[in-house]
Image (spheres, grey):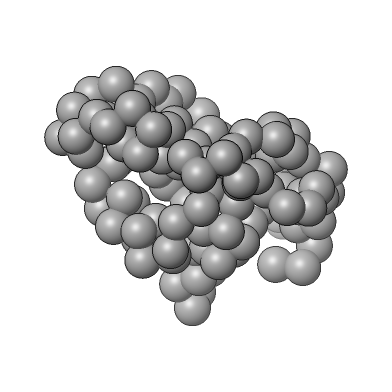
Amino acid sequence: MESMNQSNPLNTGASNAEGTSMQSTPQTKTYLKIGEAAEIIGVPASTLRFWEKQFPQIKPMKNKKGDRFYNAKDMEVLKEIYYLSHSKGVRLSQVSKKVKRDDTRITPQAELISQLRNFKEKLLKLKEQLE
């Protein structure tokens, strides 16, 4: 997962309800581990895991060990949940209805699987031609 370091638009300069910055250093990663994401949002990692169960809009990538990796879209949703629940005082049951998410996006894993299937088909066709 170390190869995921790239430029990222997560540096929004947002602040939490206490007025302190939700992000202390500029992020250069495309994906953030749960601890990093929790620090930026300003909540414990356990809160992010709870929100993941409550909000289908949050879909972090997971590796074989089950470690969560949040992308920019996930961070946007988490920041919106935090803002609505902590700053505006909206109940979590209502926050889920207000939080928007583009569910038509293709996850990197799904895209990779699709590419591998296409590659496999091409290889099988080449094999048939050689026989």
Extreme-bottom residue of the structure: 65
| Residue 32 x/y as whole percent | 63, 57
Q: Is residue 62 left or right of residue 71?
A: left
- Residue 101 position (above or below residue 7): above
> Is residue 6 visible to the viewer in this orientation of the structure?
yes
Q: Is residue 39 left or right of residue 126?
A: left
- Residue 20 position (above or below residue 64): above
Residue drawn at the location 42% of the way across and 46% of the way down? 59
Residue 89 or 35: which is nearer the viewer? 89
Residue 8 or 131: which is nearer the viewer? 8
| Residue 104 x/y as whole percent | 45, 25
| Residue 40 x/y as whole percent | 60, 51
Rendered image quadrant of residue 9: top right
> Is residue 104 visible to the viewer in this orientation of the structure?
no
Residue drawn at the location 33% of the way across and 51% of the way down? 52
Q: Is residue 16 left or right of residue 81?
A: right
Residue drawn at the location 21% of the way across and 38% of the way down? 92
Residue drawn at the location 80% of the way across and 48% of the way down? 26
- Residue 47 position (above or below residue 41): below
Residue 110 or 98: which is nearer the viewer? 98
